[in-house]
Amino acid sequence: MARDPRDQTQSPIPGLSLETRLTQLGRAGVRIRGFVNPPLVRGSTVLHNSCAERREAGRHRLEQELIYGLLGTPTHFALENALAAIEGGTRCQIVSSGLAAITTSLLAYLGTGDHCLVPDSVYGPTRHFCDTLLRQAGVETTYYVPTIDPDSLAALFRPNTKVLFLESPGSHTFEMQDVPALARVAHARGAAVLMDNTWGILFFQPFAHGVDVSIQALTKYVGGHSDIILGGIITARDSDWEKIRNASMTLGQYASPDDCWLALRGLRTLAARLKQQMESGLKVARWLATRAEVYQVLYPALPGAPGHAIWRRDYSGACSLFGVVFQPDIAEDSMIEMIDSLELFGIGASWGGFESLALPTTGTIRRTAAPPPLAGPAARFHIGLEDPNDLIADLERAFKHLRRV
Ligand SMILES: Cc1ncc(COP(=O)(O)O)c(C=O)c1O
């Protein structure tokens, strides 16, 4: 596929570090009258000089052509190109949410009579989509144990298996998947590998590890301020791009350019935020691991935690979302009292913002392939940009609520 002349994925200087590229991507070539940032372009109608010109533009719907607002504006394209570059891909489609990025991708590859393989630890709304609309469309889903070995995964493939879905680490339980080994099994059987790579943002290069389609909930760290909902689907091959772009256009997927502009702004500080949040996340996780009330910290970046070896092999860093399993004899209601008493951790869904969050996960986890690997009551923590010493002091105060049964 010919490169679009407006493509901004290529830096004029080769070999720049990711931190430097994050200050450049999505800006090259669009500096308007000296302003640092690209303008925010809103719009539905795009005017053409002639009918012939409009017809010609329509022939390039898979490209970043200005045809109609629904098919993208320069603001969308700037973000799409930056994200494609960050993930090591070539193309990106922005959609309305992280969940829409998942559902659009699944619909792009699956049709009536097809079968897909999804990890048992998948983000809950992904499971809901598979169990409802995807099933209604005649697609069957098999849930597999996320840490499955390649031979056991191979045994689950059927002649009509079209998609292997991955999410690593898993939602709430944080199992790491051996992505290259599982992707090899899928490719040997002609299936596409789709991955929710939201946790791995910046730190996991999906295409270098065998993934065909990488899905990002930009709502999280890219937005970074808990004020937008946005999704991105990134591909590295023309054949995958055509499927994703066609499905997105057919579904009428869209996202506000205002949100894209905010995501572009989020990119400028993404590396610095993540560096700080990983450092703070590790500090809090280490403290948690020393506490007698804690059975296990589910943070793949923490030495000794489940999945640490795969994380060390495949990742260059980590975000600041992890799980904590309390001792089996800690009363669940006392864990909830502990979370309710936290002053600096908000109680709420989502993650990736500047603020710390805590959420009980026990009771919200649905598993069908195997029971959840949790010995006791569990919670999920997101570590924000607060001083980690203040967060630890807050946790220490709150831990007084924990009671043994
Ligand atoms: C792993 C994962 N993927 C996708 C999503 C969906 O993102 P959004 O809220 O933008 O739909 C979430 C949201 O929490 C998530 O945790």
Image (spheres, rainbow, N blue to C red):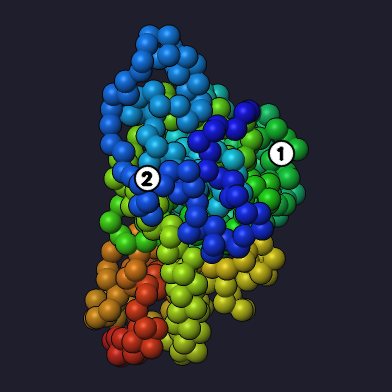
Image check: 147 left or right of 234? right
Which of 356 and 403 lies nearest the eye of the viewer?
356
Residue wearing tag 2: 32
Q: Quadrant of the N terminus?
A: top right
Q: Residue at x 28, y 56 (%)?
A: 227
Which of 33 and 385 lies nearest the eye of the viewer?
33
Q: Secondary structure at mark 2?
A: loop
Rounded to the nearest angstrom, the CA distance separating label 2 from label 1 is 45 Å
Q: Residue at x 49, y 78 (%)?
A: 279
Residue wearing tag 1: 187
Crowding at label 2, few (<14), some or many (≥20) Cα neighbours within 10 Å? Answer: few
- The x and y percentages for residue 362 are 38, 66
Residue 33 versus residue 3 in the image, above or below:
below
Q: Earlier in the sequence, mark 2 or mark 1?
A: 2
Q: Residue at x 62, y 28 (%)?
A: 2
Indicate the amino acid at tag 1. His
Crowding at label 1, few (<14), some or many (≥20) Cα neighbours within 10 Å? Answer: some
- The x and y percentages for residue 372 are 50, 62
For the question of whether residue 201 can be seen, the reply is no
- The x and y percentages for residue 115 are 57, 32
Farthest residue, direction top: 52
Which of 50 and 321 lies nearest the eye of the viewer?
50
Cβ atoms under marks 2 and 1 closer than 8 Å = no
Q: Quadrant of the C terminus?
A: bottom left
For the question of whether residue 209 can be seen, the reply is yes
Indicate the amino acid at tag 2. Ile
